[in-house]
Amino acid sequence: MKFLSVAALAGALLVTFIAPVSAAETATTVYHVKGVVKAISAHSLTLEHDAVPELQWPPMTMPFALAKNRVLPAVNIDDPVDFDVSLVDGRYEITALTVRR
């Protein structure tokens, strides 16, 4: 019986590592959000943002990391912004940002 359990586990692991990954599984979901800049640092922005229903987030204020090599437009405290965020390496990063004037 132990032999069957080990064999079944080995087969499951083999399928997991060999099975092709679909494009949908590797695609990064982008969330479009409206907010207001509340703090600026070298690698993040703190934004007071609207609700994000897709993530079940209520309106709140939180810091977002800037995506690697992301160059921000000129932005100031209290600027209204439209921004895109994606989950990258376990954290939500700003991948695009536009100041609304």
Image (spheres, rainbow, N blue to C red):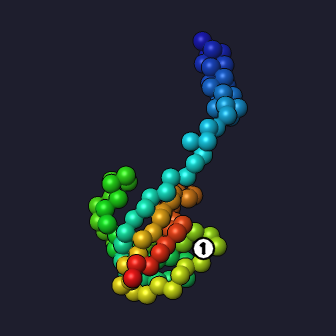
Which residue corresponds to mark 1?
70
- Determine the residue positioned at 51% across, 86% down: 74
Residue at the extreme left of the image, as rendered: 58
With respect to residue 100, does 52 lie above or below?
above
Q: Quadrant of the N terminus?
A: top right
Instruction: Give the left or right position of residue 93, taking residue 18 as reference.
Output: left
Residue 41 point in image, percent of width and height? 50, 83
Which quadrant of the view contains residue 99? bottom left
Tag 1: amino acid: Arg
Q: Position of residue 91 (x, y in %)?
A: 50, 61
Residue at image position (47%, 75%) is 98
* Pick the front one: 42 or 9: 42
Query: Who's the residue at 64% across and 37% down the image?
Result: 21
Q: Position of residue 52 (x, y in %)?
A: 35, 59
> In front: 73, or 3?
73
Front position in the image: 92 or 37: 37
Farthest residue toward the front? 101
- SS class, disc 1: loop
Q: Residues within 10 Å of mark 1 (few under 14, many from 20)?
A: few
Q: Residue 12, image x and y in percent?
A: 62, 26
Residue 7 visible here? yes
* Residue 6 visible (yes or no): no
- Residue 87 located left or right of residue 53: right
> In which quadrant of the rendered image does the C terminus lie?
bottom left
Q: Is residue 66 left or right of residue 49?
A: right
Which quadrant of the view contains residue 57?
Answer: bottom left
